[in-house]
Protein backbone atom coordinates (compact mmCIF):
# COMPACT_ATOMS: atom_id res chain seq x y z
CA UNK A 1 0.00 0.00 0.00
CA UNK A 2 1.19 3.48 -0.90
CA UNK A 3 2.22 5.79 1.93
CA UNK A 4 0.30 9.00 2.46
CA UNK A 5 1.96 11.93 0.71
CA UNK A 6 3.31 14.06 3.58
CA UNK A 7 3.42 17.21 1.41
CA UNK A 8 6.29 19.69 1.57
CA UNK A 9 7.47 20.31 5.13
CA UNK A 10 10.66 21.28 6.96
CA UNK A 11 12.21 17.85 6.29
CA UNK A 12 11.70 17.96 2.53
CA UNK A 13 14.81 17.37 0.43
CA UNK A 14 15.03 19.66 -2.59
CA UNK A 15 15.89 18.87 -6.20
CA UNK A 16 15.99 20.96 -9.37
CA UNK A 17 16.24 20.95 -13.13
CA UNK A 18 17.89 23.92 -14.84
CA UNK A 19 17.82 24.95 -18.49
CA UNK A 20 17.29 27.87 -20.83
CA UNK A 21 14.50 27.35 -21.73
CA UNK A 22 13.14 24.90 -19.13
CA UNK A 23 9.37 25.45 -19.36
CA UNK A 24 8.96 22.40 -21.63
CA UNK A 25 10.66 20.02 -19.18
CA UNK A 26 8.72 16.90 -18.15
CA UNK A 27 11.26 16.17 -15.41
CA UNK A 28 9.42 17.85 -12.49
CA UNK A 29 6.24 15.84 -13.10
CA UNK A 30 8.20 12.63 -13.59
CA UNK A 31 10.48 13.05 -10.57
CA UNK A 32 7.79 14.20 -8.15
CA UNK A 33 5.71 11.17 -9.16
CA UNK A 34 8.77 9.00 -8.48
CA UNK A 35 9.29 10.51 -5.01
CA UNK A 36 5.60 10.08 -4.17
CA UNK A 37 5.58 6.47 -5.37
CA UNK A 38 8.73 5.66 -3.38
CA UNK A 39 7.50 7.36 -0.20
CA UNK A 40 10.41 9.82 -0.31
CA UNK A 41 9.93 13.31 1.14
CA UNK A 42 11.39 15.19 -1.81
CA UNK A 43 10.33 18.10 -4.02
CA UNK A 44 11.65 18.79 -7.50
CA UNK A 45 11.22 22.12 -9.31
CA UNK A 46 12.27 23.69 -12.62
CA UNK A 47 14.43 26.83 -12.69
CA UNK A 48 14.93 28.97 -15.77
CA UNK A 49 18.65 29.77 -15.49
CA UNK A 50 20.30 31.89 -18.19
CA UNK A 51 24.05 31.37 -18.77
CA UNK A 52 24.97 34.54 -16.83
CA UNK A 53 23.15 33.12 -13.76
CA UNK A 54 24.70 29.64 -13.82
CA UNK A 55 27.47 30.37 -11.34
CA UNK A 56 25.01 32.01 -8.97
CA UNK A 57 22.73 29.00 -9.21
CA UNK A 58 25.54 26.59 -8.25
CA UNK A 59 26.39 28.82 -5.27
CA UNK A 60 22.72 28.59 -4.34
CA UNK A 61 22.76 24.80 -4.54
CA UNK A 62 25.61 24.74 -2.04
CA UNK A 63 24.00 27.33 0.24
CA UNK A 64 20.54 25.73 0.25
CA UNK A 65 21.73 22.14 0.30
CA UNK A 66 19.80 21.15 -2.82
CA UNK A 67 20.51 17.41 -3.03
CA UNK A 68 20.31 16.85 -6.78
CA UNK A 69 20.14 18.77 -10.03
CA UNK A 70 19.40 17.81 -13.62
CA UNK A 71 21.15 19.99 -16.16
CA UNK A 72 19.79 20.57 -19.65
CA UNK A 73 20.62 22.73 -22.64
CA UNK A 74 22.67 24.93 -22.75
CA UNK A 75 24.49 24.21 -19.46
CA UNK A 76 25.73 20.62 -19.80
CA UNK A 77 29.26 21.72 -20.66
CA UNK A 78 29.59 25.03 -18.83
CA UNK A 79 28.50 23.59 -15.47
CA UNK A 80 31.47 21.22 -15.35
CA UNK A 81 34.02 23.79 -14.19
CA UNK A 82 31.77 24.83 -11.30
CA UNK A 83 31.69 21.34 -9.70
CA UNK A 84 34.10 19.69 -7.24
CA UNK A 85 34.44 16.45 -9.16
CA UNK A 86 33.33 14.89 -12.45
CA UNK A 87 32.75 11.18 -12.96
CA UNK A 88 35.31 9.82 -15.49
CA UNK A 89 32.54 8.81 -17.94
CA UNK A 90 31.02 12.31 -17.89
CA UNK A 91 34.52 13.70 -18.37
CA UNK A 92 35.10 11.47 -21.40
CA UNK A 93 31.69 12.36 -22.84
CA UNK A 94 32.35 16.03 -22.13
CA UNK A 95 28.93 16.77 -20.64
CA UNK A 96 27.17 16.62 -17.26
CA UNK A 97 23.40 16.16 -17.00
CA UNK A 98 23.16 15.17 -13.31
CA UNK A 99 24.68 16.69 -10.16
CA UNK A 100 24.79 14.92 -6.81
CA UNK A 101 25.37 17.11 -3.74
CA UNK A 102 27.20 14.96 -1.19
CA UNK A 103 27.33 17.10 1.97
CA UNK A 104 28.46 20.12 0.02
CA UNK A 105 30.66 18.29 -2.47
CA UNK A 106 29.12 18.60 -5.93
CA UNK A 107 29.80 15.68 -8.28
CA UNK A 108 28.81 15.65 -11.97
CA UNK A 109 27.54 12.60 -13.84
CA UNK A 110 26.19 11.85 -17.29
CA UNK A 111 23.19 9.51 -17.35
CA UNK A 112 22.08 10.15 -20.96
CA UNK A 113 24.19 7.41 -22.59
CA UNK A 114 23.63 4.76 -19.92
CA UNK A 115 19.96 5.73 -19.80
CA UNK A 116 19.67 5.16 -23.52
CA UNK A 117 21.41 1.78 -23.39
CA UNK A 118 19.29 0.58 -20.45
CA UNK A 119 16.17 1.57 -22.38
CA UNK A 120 17.36 -0.15 -25.57
CA UNK A 121 18.16 -3.35 -23.67
CA UNK A 122 14.93 -3.44 -21.67
CA UNK A 123 12.61 -2.36 -24.47
CA UNK A 124 14.10 -3.69 -27.71
CA UNK A 125 17.29 -5.78 -27.64
CA UNK A 126 18.66 -7.32 -24.44
CA UNK A 127 21.90 -8.48 -26.09
CA UNK A 128 24.10 -5.86 -27.76
CA UNK A 129 27.30 -7.86 -27.75
CA UNK A 130 28.38 -8.95 -31.25
CA UNK A 131 25.92 -6.61 -32.96
CA UNK A 132 26.58 -4.24 -35.85
CA UNK A 133 25.20 -0.80 -34.93
CA UNK A 134 24.79 2.17 -37.28
CA UNK A 135 24.42 5.61 -35.68
CA UNK A 136 23.01 8.52 -37.69
CA UNK A 137 24.35 11.86 -36.45
CA UNK A 138 27.50 12.96 -34.65
CA UNK A 139 26.28 15.67 -32.25
CA UNK A 140 26.20 15.81 -28.46
CA UNK A 141 23.56 13.11 -28.02
CA UNK A 142 25.34 10.75 -30.40
CA UNK A 143 28.57 11.06 -28.44
CA UNK A 144 27.12 10.01 -25.07
CA UNK A 145 25.21 7.13 -26.59
CA UNK A 146 28.12 5.68 -28.54
CA UNK A 147 30.33 5.96 -25.46
CA UNK A 148 27.83 3.82 -23.53
CA UNK A 149 27.21 1.41 -26.43
CA UNK A 150 30.92 0.58 -26.70
CA UNK A 151 30.74 -0.79 -23.13
CA UNK A 152 28.41 -3.52 -24.40
CA UNK A 153 30.96 -5.08 -26.77
CA UNK A 154 29.16 -4.61 -30.07
CA UNK A 155 30.91 -6.06 -33.14
CA UNK A 156 31.19 -2.56 -34.58
CA UNK A 157 29.66 0.89 -34.34
CA UNK A 158 29.49 2.87 -37.56
CA UNK A 159 28.79 6.63 -37.51
CA UNK A 160 27.38 8.56 -40.47
CA UNK A 161 26.82 12.30 -40.36
CA UNK A 162 25.67 14.89 -42.90
CA UNK A 163 28.88 16.77 -42.14
CA UNK A 164 31.15 13.75 -42.58
CA UNK A 165 34.20 15.20 -40.79
CA UNK A 166 32.25 15.30 -37.53
CA UNK A 167 31.62 11.54 -37.82
CA UNK A 168 35.33 10.85 -38.43
CA UNK A 169 36.39 13.10 -35.55
CA UNK A 170 33.90 11.54 -33.15
CA UNK A 171 34.94 7.99 -34.07
CA UNK A 172 38.60 8.87 -33.58
CA UNK A 173 37.87 10.57 -30.28
CA UNK A 174 36.07 7.49 -28.95
CA UNK A 175 38.99 5.19 -29.73
CA UNK A 176 38.63 4.56 -33.47
CA UNK A 177 38.75 1.20 -35.21
CA UNK A 178 40.67 -0.34 -32.30
CA UNK A 179 37.73 0.42 -30.03
CA UNK A 180 35.30 -0.83 -32.68
CA UNK A 181 34.02 2.53 -33.91
CA UNK A 182 34.43 4.12 -37.36
CA UNK A 183 33.03 7.04 -39.33
CA UNK A 184 31.70 6.49 -42.84
CA UNK A 185 30.67 8.90 -45.61
CA UNK A 186 26.97 9.61 -45.94
CA UNK A 187 26.82 7.92 -49.36
CA UNK A 188 28.00 4.64 -47.81
CA UNK A 189 25.06 4.68 -45.40
CA UNK A 190 22.60 2.62 -47.43
CA UNK A 191 25.12 -0.18 -47.72
CA UNK A 192 25.99 0.00 -44.01
CA UNK A 193 22.33 -0.21 -43.02
CA UNK A 194 21.62 -3.25 -45.17
CA UNK A 195 23.35 -5.66 -42.77
CA UNK A 196 23.09 -3.65 -39.51
CA UNK A 197 21.38 -5.23 -36.50
CA UNK A 198 20.53 -1.86 -34.96
CA UNK A 199 20.17 1.57 -36.63
CA UNK A 200 19.88 4.58 -34.31
CA UNK A 201 18.73 8.07 -35.32
CA UNK A 202 20.34 10.73 -33.11
CA UNK A 203 19.67 13.60 -35.53
CA UNK A 204 16.76 15.99 -35.15
CA UNK A 205 15.26 14.89 -38.48
CA UNK A 206 11.60 13.95 -37.90
CA UNK A 207 11.21 15.88 -34.67
CA UNK A 208 8.15 18.09 -34.04
CA UNK A 209 7.26 20.36 -35.91
CA UNK A 210 8.54 18.35 -38.91
CA UNK A 211 7.08 14.89 -38.19
CA UNK A 212 6.90 13.88 -41.88
CA UNK A 213 10.68 13.70 -42.38
CA UNK A 214 12.99 10.72 -42.00
CA UNK A 215 16.81 10.65 -42.03
CA UNK A 216 16.81 7.46 -44.17
CA UNK A 217 14.09 5.42 -45.89
CA UNK A 218 12.88 2.44 -43.87
CA UNK A 219 13.44 0.29 -46.95
CA UNK A 220 17.21 0.53 -46.34
CA UNK A 221 16.89 -1.55 -43.16
CA UNK A 222 17.20 -5.30 -42.76
CA UNK A 223 13.81 -6.80 -41.83
CA UNK A 224 13.96 -7.93 -38.20
CA UNK A 225 16.62 -5.36 -37.32
CA UNK A 226 16.01 -2.82 -34.54
CA UNK A 227 15.27 0.77 -35.58
CA UNK A 228 15.79 3.19 -32.70
CA UNK A 229 15.03 6.91 -32.57
CA UNK A 230 16.06 9.34 -29.82
CA UNK A 231 13.11 11.58 -30.69
CA UNK A 232 10.01 11.16 -28.48
CA UNK A 233 7.89 13.93 -29.93
CA UNK A 234 6.25 12.41 -31.92
CA UNK A 235 6.34 9.08 -30.04
CA UNK A 236 6.49 7.23 -33.36
CA UNK A 237 8.58 9.14 -35.89
CA UNK A 238 8.33 8.72 -39.65
CA UNK A 239 11.63 6.78 -39.49
CA UNK A 240 10.08 4.30 -37.03
CA UNK A 241 6.82 4.13 -38.97
CA UNK A 242 8.66 3.17 -42.17
CA UNK A 243 10.93 0.75 -40.29
CA UNK A 244 7.90 -0.99 -38.81
CA UNK A 245 6.40 -1.30 -42.26
CA UNK A 246 9.65 -2.92 -43.34
CA UNK A 247 9.30 -5.55 -40.60
CA UNK A 248 11.76 -4.07 -38.11
CA UNK A 249 11.42 -3.90 -34.33
CA UNK A 250 11.09 -0.27 -33.29
CA UNK A 251 12.34 1.61 -30.23
CA UNK A 252 11.33 5.24 -29.55
CA UNK A 253 13.10 7.95 -27.56
CA UNK A 254 10.80 8.14 -24.55
CA UNK A 255 12.65 5.34 -22.75
CA UNK A 256 15.94 7.24 -22.92
CA UNK A 257 14.33 10.20 -21.17
CA UNK A 258 12.77 7.94 -18.51
CA UNK A 259 15.95 5.99 -17.81
CA UNK A 260 18.32 8.99 -17.74
CA UNK A 261 15.98 10.23 -15.02
CA UNK A 262 15.86 6.82 -13.35
CA UNK A 263 19.67 6.76 -13.02
CA UNK A 264 19.68 10.30 -11.60
CA UNK A 265 16.96 9.31 -9.10
CA UNK A 266 18.98 6.26 -8.05
CA UNK A 267 22.22 8.26 -7.63
CA UNK A 268 20.39 10.77 -5.40
CA UNK A 269 18.28 8.41 -3.31
CA UNK A 270 19.97 5.01 -3.43
CA UNK A 271 16.51 3.55 -4.11
CA UNK A 272 15.50 1.75 -7.35
CA UNK A 273 13.51 4.15 -9.52
CA UNK A 274 9.80 3.34 -10.01
CA UNK A 275 10.26 3.25 -13.78
CA UNK A 276 6.69 2.21 -14.71
CA UNK A 277 5.12 5.06 -12.76
CA UNK A 278 7.62 7.51 -14.26
CA UNK A 279 6.76 6.29 -17.76
CA UNK A 280 2.99 6.44 -17.18
CA UNK A 281 3.31 9.97 -15.78
CA UNK A 282 5.19 11.29 -18.80
CA UNK A 283 3.03 9.38 -21.29
CA UNK A 284 -0.10 10.95 -19.80
CA UNK A 285 1.22 14.41 -20.73
CA UNK A 286 2.13 13.40 -24.29
CA UNK A 287 -1.31 12.21 -25.31
P1 LIG B 1 22.19 16.85 -30.18
O1 LIG B 1 22.70 17.32 -28.85
O2 LIG B 1 20.70 16.56 -30.19
O3 LIG B 1 22.98 15.72 -30.73
P2 LIG B 1 23.56 18.58 -32.03
O4 LIG B 1 24.83 18.40 -31.28
O5 LIG B 1 23.19 19.95 -32.53
O6 LIG B 1 22.31 18.11 -31.18
O7 LIG B 1 23.57 17.56 -33.29
C1 LIG B 1 22.55 17.52 -34.24
C2 LIG B 1 22.80 16.35 -35.19
O8 LIG B 1 21.70 16.26 -36.12
C3 LIG B 1 24.06 16.52 -36.03
O9 LIG B 1 24.60 15.26 -36.28
C4 LIG B 1 23.49 17.14 -37.33
O10 LIG B 1 24.28 16.94 -38.49
P3 LIG B 1 25.43 18.04 -38.87
O11 LIG B 1 26.59 17.77 -37.95
O12 LIG B 1 25.76 17.75 -40.28
O13 LIG B 1 24.82 19.39 -38.65
C5 LIG B 1 22.21 16.35 -37.45
N1 LIG B 1 21.22 17.01 -38.31
C6 LIG B 1 20.44 18.08 -38.01
N2 LIG B 1 19.64 18.39 -39.05
C7 LIG B 1 19.91 17.49 -40.04
C8 LIG B 1 19.39 17.26 -41.36
N3 LIG B 1 18.44 18.04 -41.87
N4 LIG B 1 19.91 16.22 -42.08
C9 LIG B 1 20.87 15.43 -41.56
N5 LIG B 1 21.38 15.59 -40.32
C10 LIG B 1 20.91 16.59 -39.57
Image (spheres, rainbow, N blue to C red):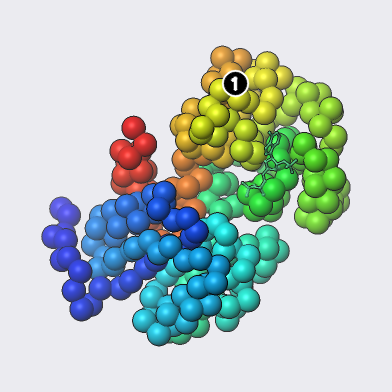
Relative height, residue 242 to residue 171 (above, below): above
Q: Is residue 83 visible?
A: yes
Whether label 1 lies within 8 Å of ligand 1 gets the answer: no
Rendered-image quarter of ligand 1: top right
Quadrant position of residue 6: bottom left
x then y, percent, for residue 57: 46, 75
Task: Report which quarter residue 110 is drawn in.
Answer: bottom right
Name the residue carrying label 1: 243
Number of residue marks: 1
User: Residue 82: image x %, image y %?
Assistant: 58, 78
Q: Is residue 150 left or right of residue 242?
A: right
**How many residues crowd mark 1 within 10 Å: few (<14), some (14–19), many (20+)?**
many
> In this image, 241 relative to 93: left or right?
left
Q: Can you say whether 24 is above or below 234 in the image?
A: below
Kindly identify the residue that appears in the image at 68 percent across and 16 percent down.
219
Residue at 44 percent of width and 56 percent of height: 22
Quadrant in the rendering for residue 67: bottom left
Q: Could you tell me residue 244's position as x and y percent?
A: 55, 19
* Residue under the image location 55 percent in, 57 percent down: 73
Find residue 220 and report its horizontal and vertical position in percent.
71, 19
User: Is 84 placed above or below 5 here?
Assistant: below
Specify whether 104 is left or right of 108: left
Q: Nearer the viewer, residue 18 or 280?
A: 18
Amino acid sequence: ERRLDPGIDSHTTLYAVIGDPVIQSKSPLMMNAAFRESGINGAYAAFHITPDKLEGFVTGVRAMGIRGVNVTIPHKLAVMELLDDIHPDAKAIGAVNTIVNDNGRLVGYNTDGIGYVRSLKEEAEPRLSGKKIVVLGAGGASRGIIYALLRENPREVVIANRTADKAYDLAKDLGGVEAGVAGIPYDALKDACSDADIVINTTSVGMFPHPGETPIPGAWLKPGAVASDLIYNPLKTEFLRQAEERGCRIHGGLGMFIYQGAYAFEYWTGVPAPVEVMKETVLATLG
